[in-house]
Amino acid sequence: MALAAALGVTALCRPTSAEAQTTAGAGDFWEQDTLSGDWGGLRSRLEKAGVTIGLQEQSELWGNVTGGLSRGGAYDGLFTLSVAVDLDKAIHWPNASLQASALQIHGFGPTALRVGSLQTISGIEATASTKLFDFWFEQKLLDGKLSLRFGQEGADEELMLTDHGALFLNSAFGFPPLTAIDLPSGGPSYPLAAPFVRIQYQPSGELTVIGAVYTADPAPPGTGDPQLRDRHGTAFRLDDHALGFAELQYAPEVLKRYGQPGTYKLGAWYASGPFADPLHDAEGLSLANPASIGVPRLHSGDHGIYAVIDQMVWKRPNTEAQGLGLFLRLMQAPADRNLTDFYVGGGLTWKGPIPERQKDEAGIAVTHIGIGGPAVHFSNDEVFFAGFGTRPSPGETIVEATYNAQLAPWLKIQPDLQYVVNPGAGIVSTDSPAPLKNDLIFGVRVTVNF
């Protein structure tokens, strides 16, 4: 982090221009693709042989100003090693590829330490560990229209994605918080990938259909932190319930011709495992029925539907991609078996807000999760029958404003500000025995590609 910060300060002091932000070769230090360069030509030789190696460090500093669990700072970071193999170049296997990645997660993120929100403040904060993440094989057929992939990955690497939402740091704009909260162990998403098989068919440039099946619970059975139950990402669970996805994507050609491309997605997921009624506490007792024997009602399976809109609404003249884009993502799930039954997130992004800084991007976004009616009623019953607890509000809302400055092809610095309304949705815990006050937290992420 100290190295990244020092490089960032140095870069901020140097002159900037549109040309300085273009990706270049291994000439000028500030214009080369990676901090460590071409490794004396080794990287180029590996790429000609079909092997591409990526090394990236993301480091974050956060400061909680007011509200939440406590004031103060936090640090978290993620180092990623990725290897991609083009099997056509490597062993003359046409239209086939391999991908693998390993994560080194360090620090302690701000959500559990300072904020207490249900939606994680940063998409990279997780339990400190070193683990395997991606590990998959892909084969393309029918001139690339059909693609088969299997191995291990996170579901949000190909599904439920919003391109414009990828700018923001809050985890809600990656794997949707509804699935992260309701699925066992948080579902197959960072930092826990899961075994999967996926088929994708693109009959035209406008339409894409994706179907995929994942192991529903990526962590082995047990209690405590699921990220520790699969500390090294090698559980490879094939004997658990399944989580299936189906997604239809539509990218109208007419919008591309007018220079305002957009993508519209409709999808659904189904998890085959048992899901407990939210009208029961952790011990299975129903405070709405004091005579409860402590066995929660189980529902067979869980499901959800979602929609995603990504649309460029204005393009700066004589540029390829600079301009304003908006996104909206919604998800609904049944309230009788889930803590959260509704999610909506959306916002506005501006690529190239300063004409001389073509690769910079700014944005503002809002994310909201709704607490299902049965869960709210359960909390009310706790207060009435047991005399403890609180009456939560129907949900939690976070507003995020951010600016991502690309100071070199290999260096980005991203200041970020988030305001959390009703952290934790008023749900009490051992960490927050009383409802938390609204929270204001600021941070900065430094990304270095080595």
Image (tube, rainbow, N blue to C red):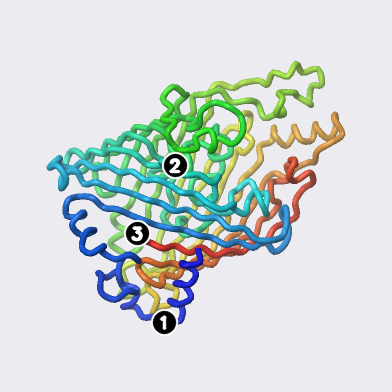
Q: CA distance from mark 2 to mark 3?
A: 37 Å
Give whichever of 74, 216 is nearer the camera: 74
Residue ID at (47%, 30%): 216
User: Where is residue 34 drawn, in percent x and y?
Assistant: 33, 64
Residue 355 relative to residue 83: left or right: right
User: Circles 2 and 1: CB distance less than 8 Å?
Assistant: no
Residue ID at (50%, 44%): 129
Binning the other alpha carbons within 10 Å of mark 2 as few (below 14), some (14 to 19) or many (20 upward) gives many
Binning the other alpha carbons within 10 Å of mark 3 as few (below 14), some (14 to 19) or many (20 upward) gives many
Comparing marks 2 and 1, which lies closer to the viewer?
2
User: Where is residue 72 drawn, in percent x and y?
Assistant: 69, 61
Check disc 3 and report the residue beneath it.
261
- Quadrant in the picture for residue 262: bottom left
**With respect to residue 112, does 18 lie above or below?**
below
User: Where is residue 231 drawn, in percent x and y?
Assistant: 50, 37
Reading the chain from its start, which is encountered first: label 1 or label 3?
1
**With respect to residue 244, does 22 lie above or below?**
below
**Secondary structure beneath disc 3?**
loop
Reading the chain from its start, which is encountered first: label 2 or label 3?
2
Residue ID at (37%, 45%): 101
**Secondary structure beneath disc 2?**
strand
Comparing marks 1 and 3, which lies closer to the viewer?
1
User: In the current view of this chain or complex, which residue is farthest to the bottom?
Assistant: 15
User: In the current view of this chain or complex, which residue is farthest to the front?
Assistant: 40
Check disc 2 and report the residue beneath it.
131
Residue 41 relative to residue 324: left or right: left
Amino acid at pointer 1? Arg
Q: CA distance from mark 2 to mark 1?
A: 37 Å
**Secondary structure beneath disc 1?**
loop
Check disc 1 and report the residue beneath it.
14
**With respect to residue 26, does 356 lie above or below?**
below
